[in-house]
């Protein structure tokens, strides 16, 4: 009771300004106006570390639920748990052991995976994780907290558990997950998976590598870098084969295909309406071409559908000593949880990967003030695309999955229209990348 009273008093001191500037705060450009306590659990063995759930009211009146890994400070304030806090190894132990914990109001249930030997000490934060908090424990385990939990089954623990069952080498080993239960339902708060050693392929690392090769005009090295991207295509294929084995293959119906065409057309109209003047100058004259490609989404009818990664770009790969490993199975965080769990064409993942090469090319050329670097950068991305696509096609042979170049192009156009909307509504400084990529995408000859 004393611990609960101390927690309630500390919650009253919650620093809303600090929340407002956090990477994971959803009200970008606004402030947190108020916070309401929802539930909390004190983690066993953490020496007073708490997981706290709070509903935060944004300045615009919207309400978002957040997970706060915290500790009560010496001055009675509720402080963010630092990477070396005992909270993290205690949370990992609870999850890998399948602990059942009573919260202040609801219950917290862990489902264990297949990892043992939780390290006894805290570690370091993965700074690349922008919307969650991921802590590496002794370079062996990763504890990932979903800072904006959603009601329903979370796709990441579900996919990792399924991939573990089929022994996939393309994903980290799964250690388990923790969910909160109350009368409103279930929401996943955290998961544990094995740490994958190696360098992230990553956006920034790849952009810098390409920029430097463009600056020195080292064509042989550029060709070698493009060839490396074939390994990502092979990894995508291997992952899809394993996802099909874990969750099965379904067949897309004509109704689903019709809905996909209609949604993509509406998305194109939205992209045209929201595009910056520079983007509009590129997309507008090519709108009819875009509509023509989008109509090929009707080729989804009868095509294989599986559980997919959902956000498979170059930033989701770790170049481990044994080959690429795919991480971050949340799907697109802005989409509802139930949408992220739906089956779909695996070629949508491939489209996302191929477009990310174009975006890397645009970013690398921009750092050299474009000029002659621009065409050289996109020549690199065309080569990288070719290697990745070829490796993907080889990798799915005999799996029950299919490759359809016309459907792939339609899915790329669909995805790039989404990028135009994202740039216009969330990240205007990013608009140059889809602006440079979509024109080239629509100008390429139609696939056979």
Image: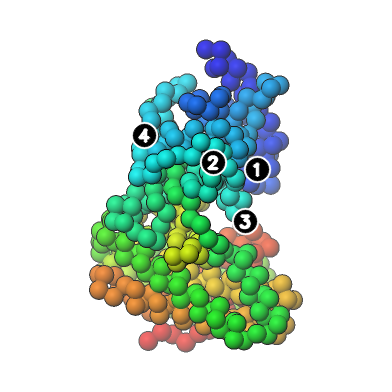
**10 Å crowding of disc 3: few (<14), some (14-19), many (20+):** few
How many marks are shown on the rendered structure? 4
The residue mark sitting in front, 2 or 3, is 2
Give how far across and how far down residue 408 sits, in percent.
40, 74
How far is the residue under mark 2 from the one under mark 1? 10 Å
Secondary structure at numbered mark 1: loop
Give how far across and how far down residue 58 sits, in percent.
62, 37
Mark identifier at residue 22: 1
Secondary structure at numbered mark 3: loop
Q: Nearer the viewer, residue 68 or 262?
A: 68
The residue identified by callout 3 is 426
Q: Residue at x 50, y 74 (%)?
A: 229
**10 Å crowding of disc 2: few (<14), some (14-19), many (20+):** many
The residue identified by callout 4 is 98
- In the displayed structure, would residue 122 be above or below residue 291? above
Secondary structure at numbered mark 2: loop
How far is the residue under mark 3 from the one under mark 4? 39 Å
Pointer 1 or 3: first along the chain: 1
Which quadrant of the structure image shows residue 176?
top left
């Amino acid at each position: 009771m004393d611990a609960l009273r101390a927690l309630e008093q500390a919650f009253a001191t919650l620093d809303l300004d600090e929340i407002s500037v956090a990477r994971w705060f959803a009200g970008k450009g606004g402030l947190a106006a108020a916070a309401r306590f929802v539930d909390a659990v004190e983690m066993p063995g953490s020496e007073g570390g708490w997981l706290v759930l709070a509903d935060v009211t944004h300045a615009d009146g919207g309400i978002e639920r957040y997970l706060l890994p915290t500790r009560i400070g010496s001055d009675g304030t509720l402080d963010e748990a630092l990477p070396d806090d005992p909270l993290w190894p205690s949370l990992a132990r609870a999850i890998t052991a399948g602990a059942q914990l009573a919260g202040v109001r609801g219950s917290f249930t862990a489902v264990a995976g297949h990892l043992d030997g939780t390290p006894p000490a805290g570690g370091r934060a993965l700074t690349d994780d922008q919307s969650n908090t991921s802590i590496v424990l002794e370079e062996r385990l990763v504890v990932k907290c979903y800072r904006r939990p959603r009601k329903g089954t979370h796709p990441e623990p579900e996919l990792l558990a399924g991939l573990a069952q089929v022994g996939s080498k393309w994903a980290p080993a799964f250690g388990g997950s923790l969910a909160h239960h109350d009368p409103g339902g279930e929401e996943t708060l955290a998961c544990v998976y094995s740490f994958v050693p190696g360098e992230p392929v990553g956006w920034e690392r790849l952009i810098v590598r390409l920029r430097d090769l463009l600056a020195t005009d080292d064509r042989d090295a550029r060709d070698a870098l493009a060839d490396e991207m074939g390994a990502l295509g092979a990894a995508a294929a291997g992952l899809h084969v394993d996802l099909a084995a874990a969750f099965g293959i379904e067949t897309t119906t004509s109704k689903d295909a019709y809905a996909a065409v209609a949604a993509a057309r509406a998305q194109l109209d939205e992209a045209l309406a929201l595009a910056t003047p520079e983007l509009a100058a590129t997309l507008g004259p090519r709108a009819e071409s875009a509509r023509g490609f989008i109509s090929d989404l009707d080729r989804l009818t009868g095509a294989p559908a599986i559980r997919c990664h959902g956000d498979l770009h170059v930033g989701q790969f770790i170049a481990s000593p044994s080959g690429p490993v795919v991480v971050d199975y949340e799907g697109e965080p802005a989409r509802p949880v139930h949408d992220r769990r739906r089956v779909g064409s695996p070629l949508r993942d491939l489209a996302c990967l191929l477009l990310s090469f174009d975006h890397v090319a645009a970013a690398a050329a921009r750092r050299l003030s474009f000029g002659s670097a621009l065409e050289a950068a996109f020549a690199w991305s065309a080569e990288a695309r070719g290697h990745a696509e070829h490796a993907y096609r080889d990798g799915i042979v005999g799996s029950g999955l299919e490759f359809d170049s016309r459907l792939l192009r339609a899915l790329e156009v669909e995805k790039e229209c989404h990028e135009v909307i994202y740039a216009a509504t969330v990240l205007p400084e990013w608009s140059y990348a889809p602006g440079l990529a979509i024109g080239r995408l629509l100008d390429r000859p139609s696939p056979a």
